[in-house]
Amino acid sequence: MESVELIDPTEKITPEIIKKRAVKGAAILTIRTILMQTVAFFANVLLTVFLEPSQYGVFFLVSAVINFLTYFSDIGFAAALIQKKENLTATELKTIFTTQQALVLILIIIIYITTPLIKNIYHLNIEAMYLLWALALSLFLSSLKIIPSVLMERRLEFNKLIIPQLIETVLFNVVVVFLAWKNFGINSFTIAVLVRGFAGLLATYFIQPWIPALSFSKEALKSILKFGIPYQINTMLAMIKDDGMTLYLGSILGPSGIGLLAWAQKWAFAPLRFFMDQVIKVSFPAFSRLQDNEKELSGAVSKSILYICLLVFPSLVMLLILAPSFVKVIPKYYKWSPALIALALLAINSALAAITTPITNTLNAIGKISVTFKFMIMWTVLTWVFVPFLALKFGVNGAAFGFTLVGLSSIIALILALKFVHLNYLQIIGKPLIVSTILGISVFIIKSLIPISPVQIISMIIGGSFVYVISIALIEPKIFDILRLKKNV
């Protein structure tokens, strides 16, 4: 197969260059995340004001249907291309593109044929069906971006990669909030999904030109599938554990119950989306290229988890203390108060994920896909054992408690992972726990001194932020160097 050195020069990158680009990439993705999450935060607040829990639940449920089916349209192509040590060839790129499109088109046909069945199972109206079809079309548009996105990610060119993502996020949230305000209901999501899909596709090809071409090589596909299939099996298990469970819970809890659970999950995992995702995005290609350097890899993984936890743990503490006041102070927001217990339970799960997700991501990056496969089997089985049973017995809170029990089993994974990556968990997690405890006590004192009001909320945010900065400065001042890009990841 022909060489494509100009397409993919990443195999020449040294460990030092990798770390520098990883730091730069993490900074760029942090800026992206701040912008995207700020937009998404205010959009979510407005949506939960304009929409009823049942409408919010329909979007969550229909999205889960698409996410469930999406896993059958991929065989881990993108991850395999990114993780591959050797040069990519033009034949490989064309083969993967062709295979991906064929799978997606088959999936879209399946979605169209099974629409009546999906409608009957979840008692969805015609507006929900339009949303389903819009999400199916967006899946096709997204699949067209796979090769340009992989090329940018292999080069760690996140300065380019973030532009389509920012465009998609801003357009989606602006459109959906405006239409929800105008009482478009579920159709707000349908229109916003289509706008996002077309805008993201055009932006991606403008930034990273690549001429789509259809071709197929059995040898090229086989070389990619060696990593892709095990990776996708893991992803499929995660889908069965998460989206599959959401679909099942939809039949137990109904649209309103799913809406409450979705609200709790959205906020409980917001710190992960805000602080962890960009690190994961950068670390997978970076760690893949450090997989033969055990010392550098262990140090990078340890620092990644430490700084993720220093940001995620205190955020969860602030969230849990602030949430009860928010639902009482914000007009039309009290309808979400039944989900506060679920929020607290899922926050525990979120804290554990801040540790386990970077580790499983690292194991995948160094080719230990069989290890993460065993972890995923364990979590999937436990999810389907505990969550449905507790949801039937105790509703939304029971489902949340079931997810938390599954999260606690991550301790087993953390212990077993030490066979492959040297980590000192006490050193990594100790400082974040100290900072979070100091922050929690301080904010709780402020809350107890001021009656529930906007003034109380503002005081807790300002006071908590001040205590957090002081605590970090005393306990782990190096985090400020990381944020200023003066140290390595």
Image (spheres, grey):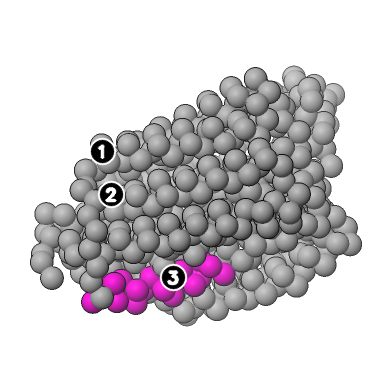
x then y, percent, for residue 107: 49, 59
Q: Which residue is mark 3?
A: 231
Q: Residue at x 44, y 75 (%)?
A: 230
Type of secondary structure dominating the magenta stretch: helix
Residue with the most extreme right position = 393
Of callouts 2 and 1, which one flags the residue occurring earlier in the amino acid sequence? 2
Quadrant in the picture for residue 460: top right
Q: Quadrant of the N terminus?
A: bottom left
Of callouts 2 and 3, which one flags the residue occurring earlier in the amino acid sequence? 2
Q: Residue at x 55, y 45 (%)?
A: 133
Structural distance between the alpha carbons of marks 2 and 3: 21 Å
Query: Decide: marks 1, 3 in contact (CB < 8 A)?
Result: no
Q: Is residue 366 left or right of residue 475?
A: left
Q: Residue at x 51, y 49 (%)?
A: 136
Q: Residues within 10 Å of mark 1 (few under 14, many from 20)?
A: some
x then y, percent, for residue 442: 72, 37
Badge 1 marks a residue whose secondary structure is helix
- Identify the amino acid type marked 3: Tyr
Q: Residues within 10 Å of mark 2 (few under 14, many from 20)?
A: many
Q: Is residue 174 left or right of residue 228?
A: right
433 or 92, nearer to the observer: 92
Magenta-drawn segment: 219-237
x then y, percent, for residue 32: 42, 37
Q: Which residue is mark 2?
A: 148
Q: Residue at x 68, y 30 (%)?
A: 185
Is residue 233 highlighted in magenta? yes
Q: Which residue is mark 1?
A: 207
Is residue 443 highlighted in magenta? no
294 or 52, nearer to the observer: 52
